[in-house]
């Protein structure tokens, strides 16, 4: 049993859209999967009280420190989340194990992009010939939302 998601988040982890803008952006995203050969299980949007880890599931395999350039195991992020008690954070600064620096979680290099956000639009198990959103679609989604967006491709 596996699920795939296209997740769209504001590039600023603290930013949230107005409700009307959120609904408009989600409706626009849903329209990509409405063709006769396309499909999607569910398109929805969510607001989060705090900055929340938008993970890529098994797509991410390695984290590299943005301060010293050394590799940080993915297990470390799991430990950070466990110590935090949830996927939601009040602030993103953490002490990294490689060089002992204090670095924002969203500044580390992930070999497959993940993000932190207080809002997301997600499409569950989407199918179409062109899978992910192209630059033009991302720009239009950003226009509707009122903020630039990043695309996270998640596979569990
Ligand atoms: Zn480091």
Image: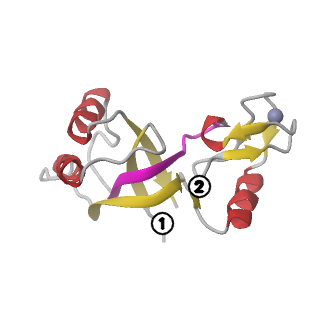
**Within 8 Å: ligand 1 and the Cβ of disc 1?**
no
Looking at the rendered structure, which numbered label has been put on residue 39? none
**Residue at screen point 45% across, 61% down:** 49
Return the residue at label 2: 90
Q: Quadrant of ligand 1?
A: top right
**Residue at screen point 30% across, 47% down:** 17
Mark 2 vs 1, N-terminal side: 1
**Residue at screen point 66% across, 69% down:** 85
Looking at the rendered structure, which numbered label has been put on residue 2? 1
Near-viewer residue (82 or 15):
15
Rounded to the nearest whole Å, what is the CA distance between mark 2 and mark 1? 30 Å
Whether 2 is drawn above or below 69: the answer is below
Whether 18 is drawn above or below 71: the answer is below
Q: Marks 2 and 1: which is nearer the front? A: 2
Give x and y (percent) for residue 28. Answer: 18, 46
Give x and y (percent) for residue 15. Answer: 40, 44
**Residue at screen point 43% across, 57% down:** 4
**Which image quarter: residue 90?**
bottom right
Near-viewer residue (64 or 103):
103
Residue most toward the bottom? 1
Residue most toward the front? 90
Q: Is residue 50 left or right of residue 47?
A: right
Instruction: Classify mark 2: residues with Cα within 10 Å, few (<14), some (14-19) or many (20+).
Output: few
Q: Which residues are magenta?
A: 109-123
Give x and y (percent) for residue 153. Answer: 45, 47
Q: Magenta segment: does it hold 114?
A: yes
Give x and y (percent) for residue 73. Answer: 78, 48
**Which image quarter: residue 19?**
bottom left
Q: Magenta segment: does it hold 51?
A: no
Whether 94 is drawn above or below 81: the answer is above
């Amino acid at each position: 049993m596996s699920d795939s998601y296209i997740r769209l988040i504001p590039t600023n982890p603290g930013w949230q859209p107005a409700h009307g803008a959120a609904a408009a952006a989600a409706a626009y995203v849903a329209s990509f999967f409405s063709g006769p050969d396309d499909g999607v299980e569910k398109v929805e949007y969510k607001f989060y009280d705090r900055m929340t880890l938008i993970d890529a599931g098994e797509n991410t395999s390695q984290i590299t420190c943005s301060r010293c350039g050394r590799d940080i195991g993915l297990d470390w992020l799991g430990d950070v989340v466990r110590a935090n008690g949830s996927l939601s954070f009040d602030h993103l600064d953490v002490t990294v194990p490689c060089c002992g620096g204090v670095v924002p979680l969203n500044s580390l290099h992930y070999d497959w992009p993940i993000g932190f956000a207080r809002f997301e639009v997600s499409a569950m198990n989407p199918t179409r010939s062109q899978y992910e959103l192209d630059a033009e679609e991302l720009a239009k989604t950003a226009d509707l939302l009122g903020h630039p967006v990043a695309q996270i491709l998640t596979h569990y």
